[in-house]
Image: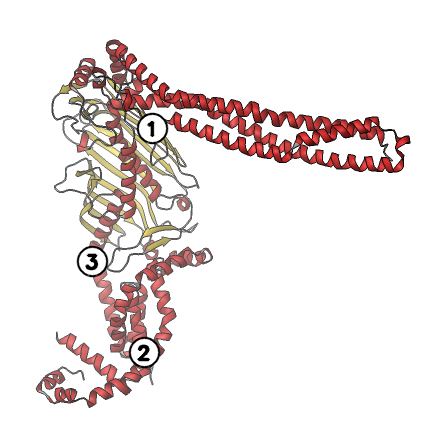
Amino acid sequence: MKIMRWKAIVPLLLVLVLIGIGYVLYSDTLVEHTIESLGADLVGAKVDLDEADLSLREGRVRLVGLAAANPNAPMRNLVEASEIIADVRVLPLLEKKVVIEQASFRGVRFGTERAESGELENPSPESGRLLREISGWADRVRIPPLNLDALNAVVNVDAVSIDSLTTVSRARGVVAFADSVRTVWEQNLSQLNPAQLIDTARALVDRLNRANALTLGLAGITDLANSSRSVLTSLTSTTDRLSGLDSNVRVTMNMLTQNVTGLVDDRAADYAYARRLLRLPSLDAPDLSASLFGDMAVARLEPVLYWVNQAERYLPPGLNPRRYPGPKRPRRAGVTVTFPKRDAIPKFLVESADADLAIGGEGVAAGAYAAALSGVTTEPAIYGQPLRAMVQRSGATVGPTDIRVNLALDHTGSVISDSGSAYLNGIPLPQFALAGSRVNVDLGTGSTELSLARTGDSLVGQWTWRSNQVRWSRGGGSGERRAEGGEQEAGGVAQRLGAFAEDFLWQAIASLEDVEITVRFSGSPRGPSLRIGSNVGRVVAANLRRELGERIEQAEQQVRQQVNRLVDQYVTEAESRVAALESEVAAVVGVRLSEVVDVRTELERAIRRVIPRP
Amino acid sequence: MYMILKLIQKLIATLNSDGTPGQVAAGMAIGTVFGLTPLLNLHNLLILSVVVLVRVTFPAVMLGWFVAVPLGFAFDPLFDELGQRLLETLALNPVWTAVTNTPVIALANLNNSVVLGSLVVWMIAVFPLYLLFRWGVGRYRATVYARLQRMKIYRAVKASKLYNVYRLFRPE
């Protein structure tokens, strides 16, 4: 029987040709869907593309009308480009690799409005997780409330519960630990029984001192030698064990002493906690700045952290295999693992790209800007060069203004090393409500400067806003969540200020024309800690100190007394328990050890005198 | 509708009389690959080409495909798990590195856990499936089909006008 069905070759070829034609016909749609899908995963919001035109013969892709929604403000676009032309190398496509030699972005605009929401219905697990993590960080950031109403009311110090104070739980822990080690040490001392051994050794030393070799005879000397050897062995063993115990005692006592000393810091933390609980304002300027600008700072840092983390996700260091979600299909998507190979072509690479950015209108920021980008790759370790980006003004329309953005993401080694700086002058700065009040600030036109550096899992940075055209206003809804680009204030306590506090705040700041806000952040890229400073915070603090300092001081005094009343007993108990442990047990161990060592020395000396060495 | 009816007739004819049980079983065993593994992949195009060029009973391939489609969906978690284990096996890293960095082969999506897991399962199962299908087709022809032919209802349907209509669509 013939195995091959030769007549089928022509239909088969026909089918393959049809598949090829279908692929060519639908390749544009395929490119469009792929970009929209990958883009949505990258941005964490919808990415729309009007048209894609792929020409494999020329190795060129033309994308028209690309718009990526802002994940933090879904009714606005993060970025929009009217046309993108990319020169693609064709052969790497056979390896499912995309290498773009040169890409040009034209008509790039930022923050444009969208007709429909760009929120994803089903965000990818990874980008959804990252958004949730950053949002969780924003919720966790503790923004001290600015509340002066407590000063007009009787301070209810009874609200401070004993169980919520760190000092109490820490002091209880010290007492429990001291009791526990006391039991163990006493058991050890009792088992070692050094007192009895010391008495026996001393008696033996007396016998040896009184002994005479001539009168003892051979049998007597042998008996004495055996007894001496036995006691000496016991003394050596006891010395070793006591030394071990003594060393343990010293370390533990040192630790306990440190814990007792640390109760002072715990008490200070409890004062601060109680002050927050009772909503007493701080007179500390940075603390007030955090109250006033914390929400604004957190809302603006959220996208920065999101992109810092996305950079790690899409530009991972090293050559280890990477896991990505599989393609969407009716069947399970599974996991797609890529295996980077040194000296091979990266899976995705944009060797260089340039963009013409335009900010239209008559504003001082209006004009043309040029951006350049190089080394964008999913496998930096293979490419071996960091991603670099630069933006600068190429042509002004109005007013002197300055924009400089530099970015270098070095993921070529095993440790991530990112650095970036952005300085924008003459741009519209945010407007927002202060500390959840009806006092609004419009920073007007000013400058902003962001710098950050990341090494491994450590991120440090600073963001400053400066303006000398500040406008203050009162009114509107309380805690009005107004921020540039429709952003929402995130995290913290955005509560409505009382009328008294609002009046006070208004009087303190209404005449201020210059504002400088600085946010310093450091720590993990997924949840850094913040320090916020501002001249506004300092002014409000000074006014508070002048107008209300005495009342705040009195209220703080009450709080401190209440905390002291609750914790003193426990702290005293912890101190006395540790002191007793030191004098009654720890010191005894040291004394016993020195006694054993002394008696052992005496015994050795007596043995040498009576029993001469052969 | 006409195409579907013809296809069903082809399938029935294949089961009942076309080709030896071995030929039918081989076609069915090969056809299961289209149901067990995600369809739009390079390996399926390759196997389709083989099926077209080699004298395998084509309707049997279709039958194998239909039988395996629900199994494919049902066993996806297993394929995913197996595929992930294989892709995470350090000793196999050089293999996957070569596969994913070789032109054309890289297009086969073998670095996807479901594709790899299902393909490996099919490759292991294809011969046992062939034996199973061969036994099944033999048993069907010897028992079920023979008994069916003796049933009154079958003979009544065969003598009816409806059957004449059915014959009109019978493939040559």
Identified by mark 1, the residue type is: Ser
Q: Name the residue located 35 percent from the left edge and 35 percent from the top edge.
A: A525
Are the residues under badges 1 and 3 in a single subunit?
yes
- Of tags 2 and 1, the one toward the viewer is 1
Structural distance between the alpha carbons of marks 2 and 1:
72 Å
The answer to whether residue A261 is above or below residue A120 is: above
- Chain letter for mark 3, please: A
Q: Which residue is mark 2?
A: B133
Q: Which residue is mark 1?
A: A164
Task: Say whether residue A556 is visible.
Answer: yes
At which x and y percent is residue B163? 12, 85
Depth check, mark 2 against mark 3: the one in front is 2
Task: Answer above or below: position of A498 versus A80.
Answer: above
What is the CA distance from the residue labelled 1 to the residue labelled 3?
65 Å
Which of these two is toward me, B167 or A16? B167
Q: Quadrant of residue A587?
A: top right
Give the structural element (helix, strand or loop) at label 1: helix
**Residue at position x 37%, y 69% from top?**
B123
Q: On the image, which quarter does residue A197 sit in? A: top right
Q: Are marks 2 and 1 on the same chain?
A: no
Question: In the rendered structure, which amino acid carries the disc numbered 3?
Answer: Tyr
Q: Considering only vertical position in the picture, is A336 above or below A107?
A: below
Q: Is residue A387 left or right of residue A255?
A: left
Q: Look at 90% across and 35% down and name the residue there.
A: A217
Q: Secondary structure at mark 2?
A: helix
Describe the colour scheme in one phrase. Answer: secondary structure
Which image quadrant is residue B67 in? bottom left
Return the residue at label 3. Answer: A26
Label 3, secondary structure: give it.
helix
**Callouts 1 and 3 close, C-beta under 8 Å:** no
Q: Amino acid at mark 2?
A: Phe
Other residues around mark 2 within 10 Å, as few (<14) / some (14–19) / many (≥20) = many
